[in-house]
Amino acid sequence: MKLKEIHKLFVKEGIEADPRGLDIVKLNLLKRKEEYNALSDKKKKDYDIESLTNPYYDSRILYGDENTEIKTVMVGIDIETQEILLAKQLINLGNDIDLIIAHHPESYAYSTFYGVIEMQADILSKQGIPINVTEKIVSDRMKEVQRKVLPQNNERTYDAAKLLNIPFMTAHSVADNHVASFLQKEIEALKPVYLKEIMELLDKYPEYKHASEIGHAPLILEGSDYSRCGKVFVDMTGGAEGPLESFEKLETAGIGTIILMSLSSRGIREAEKHHLNIILAGHVSSDNLGLNLLFDKLENKTLEKLNFIECSGFRRFRR
């Protein structure tokens, strides 16, 4: 399959798995088109045209001919210059590598990924928080992340891929949407009473089993095995850790348990303050689950099997 076909399918499947729902995604894209049409011809030249059809700034083809035929991919959770050099060394040793896929965004996908945080407003609103409230607190979080990204040297990995002429892309929110929606549906079907039931469910998935084997098992951060779950919210997409002001609002909205990839020290204190149960499913393991669900769809829908070279924490588990 061609590079552009992989990217197109990733975006399509990312939209279908988006926890906001298809109607909200379409509304968001319509708003972007209206903003674009209102621009002068001069400003349109600098506009990110792909964002009119791809809702996810953090999931992009960064380098390479879109018509490149892809049979072997090297996939990593984090891809930086050292992984690009590793790929070149593997190529020099006789391995075919047609494409490198990073989960976490790099280059342009990193410079603009704060824009993806906007989706958290609708995700939080679906949990019962008024949209006017979520828009305000998420807007503040977007500005905070933008300020952190702005001074970074974001072109290093892109430059390495370009200089060594290795196609390079990122698949961030398109994968995170899958793990968030998948786990939310699995837990709703399970109807757990106690936190231990969620932990047992996670242990059934190979990504979390592998993480446990290497010392990164899912963890009940707040609560205990026999703490009752209440309403469970799986919060694993939206670019970055959400606004911690949302914890108070989620408590008020009736959320009892939040399942996350990771949580800052300040976030732990906020969870304690608002009596929330917190399960840390694991960051890299959850990233792996999202990627594997996405790759399964890619291979099933195209009826083509890719050859995978695993690196930087990625492990391929087929279902």
Image (cartoon, helix red, strand yellow):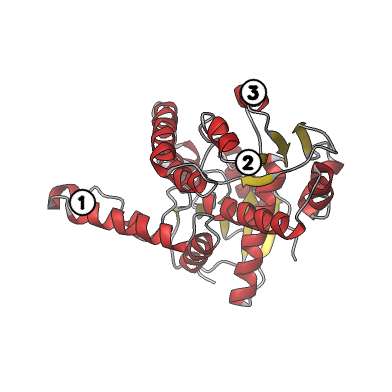
Of the 4 image quadrants, the one containing the N terminus is bottom right
**Please, what is the three-letter code of the amino acid marked with disc 2?**
Ile
Q: Nearer the viewer, mark 2 or mark 1?
A: 2
Of the 4 image quadrants, the one containing the C terminus is bottom right
Crowd tier of the residue under label 2, counting other residues whose Cα lies within 10 Å: few below 14, some 14–19, many 20 or above: many
* Image spot of residue 275 (x, y percent): 68, 29
The residue nearer to you, when weighing 178 against 227, is: 227
The residue shown at (72%, 37%) is: 280
Distance between the alpha carbons at the discs numbered 3 and 1: 48 Å
* Image spot of residue 29 (x, y percent): 35, 57
Relative to 127, does residue 221 appear above or below in the rendering? Answer: above
Instruction: Give the labeled residue for mark 3.
Output: 273
Instruction: Give the labeled residue for mark 1.
Output: 45
The residue nearer to you, when weighing 250 against 76, is: 250
**Please, what is the three-letter code of the amino acid marked with disc 3?**
Lys
Distance between the alpha carbons at the discs numbered 2 and 3: 14 Å
Q: Is residue 96 visible?
A: no
Crowd tier of the residue under label 1, counting other residues whose Cα lies within 10 Å: few below 14, some 14–19, many 20 or above: few
Distance between the alpha carbons at the discs numbered 2 and 1: 45 Å
Residue 163 horizontal side relative to residue 27, left or right: right
Relative to 273, does residue 63 appear above or below in the rendering? Answer: below
Say whether disc 3 or disc 1 marks the residue closer to the N-terminus: 1
